[in-house]
Image (cartoon, helix red, strand yellow):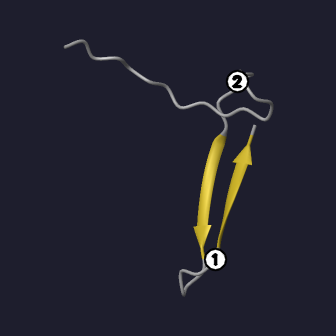
């Protein structure tokens, strides 16, 4: 069985991956009901 390596990517237009690797920060409220994701390019 061959093992394929997959790379995580981000795209804002379908089929076009962004060339830069963003820094991603996730936050969550104290009660866990809401959160935010920040993408820095």
Q: How many marks?
A: 2
Vertical relation: 18 (above or below) 39: above
Find disc 2 in the rendering and name its residue. 17
Q: Is residue 32 left or right of residue 2?
A: right
Give whichever of discs 2 and 1 has the lower sequence position: 2
Vertical relation: 14 (above or below) 34: above
- In three-dimensional space, the C-alpha distance between marks 2 and 1, rounded to whole angstroms, equals 28 Å
Identify the mark at residue 9; answer none if there is no mark. none
Split into 4 quadrants, where in the image is the N terminus?
A: top left
SS assignment at label 1: loop
Work out whether residue 8 or residue 20 is closer to the camera in this orientation and state it.
8
Whether the residues at callouts 2 and 1 have beta carbons within 8 Å, the answer is no
Residue placed at 70% from the left, 26% from the top?
20
Residue placed at 75% from the left, 37% from the top?
41
- Using a 10 Å C-alpha cutoff, classify the residue at mark 1 as few (fewer than 14 neighbours), some (14 to 19) or many (20 or more): few
Vertical relation: 29 (above or below) 8: below
Task: Residue 18 in the image: state x and y as whole percent.
Answer: 73, 26
Task: Residue 13 in the image: state x and y as whole percent.
Answer: 80, 30
Vertical relation: 34 (above or below) 36: below
Work out whether residue 14 or residue 19 is closer to the camera in this orientation and state it.
14
SS assignment at label 2: loop
Work out whether residue 39 or residue 1 is closer to the camera in this orientation and state it.
1
Identify the mark at residue 34; answer none if there is no mark. 1
Residue placed at 75% from the left, 29% from the top?
14
């Amino acid at each position: 069985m061959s093992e394929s390596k997959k790379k995580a990517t981000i795209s804002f237009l379908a089929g076009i991956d962004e060339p830069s690797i963003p820094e991603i920060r996730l936050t969550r409220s104290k009660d866990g009901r809401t959160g935010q994701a920040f993408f820095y390019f």
